[in-house]
Image: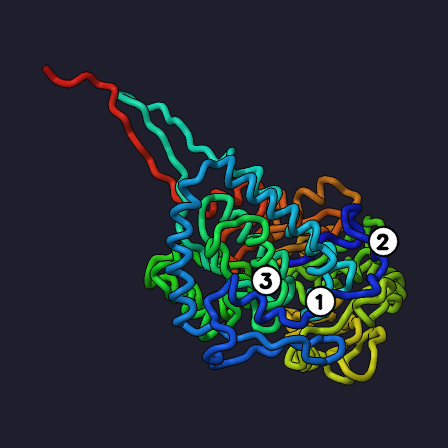
Amino acid sequence: MDPLSPTDPTTPSHPTTPSHPPSLAGITDRTTDRTTGHTTGGTPAPTLLRVLNPATEELVATVPAATPVDVDAAVRRATAAQQAWAGAAPADRARILRRFATVVDTHIEELALLEVREAGHTLGNARWEAGNVRDLLDYAAGGVERLTGRQIPVPGGLDLTILEPLGVVGVIAPWNFPLPIAAWATAPALAAGNAVVLKPAEATPLTALRLAELALDAGLPEHLFQVLPGEGPVAGAALVEHPGIAKIVFTGSTRTGKRIMAKAADQVKRITLELGGKSPTLVFADADLPAAAAATPMSFLDNSGQDCCARTRILVQQEVYDRFLDLLAPAVEGIVVGDPLDPRTDMGPLISRAQLDRVRSYVPEDAPALRGKAPDGPGFWYPPTLLTDVPEDAPCAVEEIFGPVAVVLPFTDEADAIRLANATPYGLAGSIWTRDLGRALRTSRAVRAGNLSVNSHASVRYWTPFGGYGQSGLGRELGPDALTAFTETKNVFISTEGSPA
């Protein structure tokens, strides 16, 4: 998932770094009692999740990993809490969610600093992400009282539809945008009257745990929103397979999404999957080339390229290919990679050593490339990298790298651009740069992707729908219909015919 493009006017600038970050001491003990089923101070959990700072490789915290027993207990508690929550007046649910948004707003800086320390995000991005959680809660609260059914004309009576909550929703969130993506599902699910059990990624549980604690501070009923840090094959699998979970919302790799889909099929369980991407940027010869070149670097370097919407295939019309590269090169070289807390930093580290090794595996040392600069020493650093003169079917051109690497490929005409854009099993996002309105509309219809931008790289707004084609996922999140994705439609027919004599 990506934040708004750096060229979007709603994207934050880099505010001043605070001088006194909040302490993380005791965060695990303090949160697990109130928001999970773990016992602190008693029998130790079988596994401890180690949270490392990606910029320094220092240990930030250890968190007990949930077991299948913990998952079962959490789902049982959530089931009881959900019944009372669903029966509450819509205005009361909306009021509590708005209060939750207000509490998050007062803790923006704390949440942002946790995100920086556990995920390596730049401080400006992290502040935006924490603010996005606030906005999602507020937006979802506004939908509670508008979650209405319909009256459908039928002969012989009155026909009504009623939207009812599903029950308990399981959310499995990723490490690349831990805060906002967790809220993408949690906020509308709660607003629609459901309970939520959230499993954050193993590497980034701290912001989720703190968010659950803030929910209780805001007055959300106990056990309605629980966070269970844990390993995917253990806690994640238990959540997917639990018969008390009515729906799973998963964001992550396509490979894992397929396994979740198969497991959910046994129970005909509802799922929403937001998976991988290999998104294109199409630069036509008539485009505003300086504007496109200036905007392109952060389209694939934001969050160090760890973004399923990253525009990692830059397709440029042949006649302006060399000119565009001349403009793009200094823009990429000017990206500042370094300390995420430094307001001058544009790009931070990758999340882990394993992710760093994965990115390196796609870029041979002798590959024709334009490389920026990255720090030496501790931390999972990789420089901004543009690959040129690569075959269009090379692994780096067709597989999701999930790092700060993009390929630049030429195309001849509009048909060739569309062919290249669609030459992937993914279909999440993309950008089209042209001054020709007709071409923009034709290309937007022809490119198979769920989220397209014209003369922009912005993909995500909480008030518009988000999701992908093909192996980029299943279902849509966000937007005006987000709450209905967490409901069942019940149809009721009431006869108005008189009783027979």
The x and y percentages for residue 325 are 85, 64
**Disc on the earlier residue, 3 or 1:** 3
Dot placed on the residue nearer the N-terminal end, 2 or 3: 3
Name the residue carrying label 1.
Answer: 305
> Residue 150, position in %: x, y?
42, 30
Q: Which mark is residue 314?
A: none
Decide: few, some or many residues near mark 1? Use Cα within 10 Å; few <14, some 14-19, many ≥20. Answer: many
Inspect the image, locate mark 2, and give the three-letter code of the amino acid beneath it. Leu
Residue at disc 3, secondary structure: helix
Viewer-side label of 2, 1:
1
Considering every residue shown, the one lying at the far top of the view is: 501
Tag 3 near tag 1, CB within 8 Å: no
Kindly check if marks 2 and 3 are in contact, taking CB atoms under 8 A apart as contact: no
Residue 412 visible in the snapshot: no
**Residue at 53%, 75% in the rendered image:** 64
Real-space CA distance between mark 3 and mark 1, rounded to the nearest whole angstrom: 22 Å
On the image, the x and y values in percent for residue 170 come to 46, 59
Q: For the residue marked with disc 3, what is the amino acid? A: Ala
Mark 1: which amino acid? Gly
**For this rendering, which residue is in front, 200 or 211?**
211
Residue placed under numbered mark 3 in the picture: 208
Tell me, yes or no, if residue 32 can be seen here: yes
Does residue 167 appear left or right of residue 284 in this picture? left
Label 1 secondary element: helix
Q: Residue at x 42, y 33 (%)?
A: 149
Q: Residue at x 54, y 38 (%)?
A: 143
Mark closer to the observer (2, 3)? 3
Q: Quadrant of the N terminus?
A: bottom right
